[in-house]
Amino acid sequence: MARDEQLKERWQEVVTKLSNQFADGDTLDLDAIIYLIGVQELGQLERTFKKDHKLDLMHIAICKLLMPYGYYDFDFVDEDGWPHYKVKDELPNLKAGEQSILMKEAIVNYFVETKFID
C-alpha cells in the first residue's frame, strides 16, 4: 500500500474513533484532535480549561507530536504539572497543506505508538 494511502486510512481511523468517543459521532477536526492530545499529555482529564489554556494545551500537543521529528525536546514539568519543551530545530516554512499532512502523520504515529490504532 502506498504511504499516502496508508496515512489516509489511518487518519480516518483516528478521526472516527476519537469522534465516536468524544464528539458523539460528530467529526472532530485537526485542531480538536490536537487539543485532545494536549489534554492527554497534561494528564488533567477531569479539569475544565479556559480559552487561554486551550491554546497552551494545543502547544503541548504540537511539541509532543513533533518531538520525534527533531523539532522539540522535553524540558521539564512545572509545579502545576504542565510540561515544557524547548525548540531544538526551527520548523521549516511549509504551505498550509504540507503543515496539515505533517500534523496528520505525527498524530497517526502518536496513536500507533500509544496503541490506540494499529
Image (tube, rainbow, N blue to C red):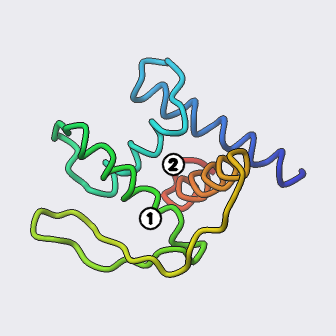
Tell me the element at label 2. loop
Residue at 58% of width from left, 40% of height from top?
A: 14
Q: Nearer the viewer, residue 104 or 110?
A: 104
Which residue is more in the foreground, 94 or 84?
94
Identify which residue is drawn at 66% across, 56% down: 102
> Which is nearer the eye, 115 or 88?
88
Residue 61: image location, x then y, percent: 42, 56
* Mark 1 vs 2, N-terminal side: 1
Distance from disc 1 to disc 2, alpha carbons, whole Å, reads: 20 Å
Task: Name the quadrant containing residue 46.
Answer: top left
Q: Residue at x 63, y 51 (%)?
A: 118
**How far across and down, in percent of the image, does residue 54 sit?**
30, 43
Q: Secondary structure at mark 1?
A: helix
**Are there few (<14), some (14-19), or many (20+) residues within 10 Å of tag 2?**
few
Residue 40 x/y as whole percent: 33, 51
Q: Is residue 67 above or below residue 94?
A: below
Q: Position of residue 2 (x, y in %)?
A: 89, 52
Residue indicated by mark 2: 116
Nearer the observer: mark 1 or 2; the answer is: 1
Residue sitting at 66 percent across and 54 percent down? 105
Which amino acid, by three-letter code, is at mark 2?
Answer: Phe
Rendered image: mark on residue 63: 1
Which amino acid, mark 1? Cys
Examine the rendered structure and indicate whether residue 102 appears above or below residue 83: above
In this rendering, would 2 be left or right of 47?
right
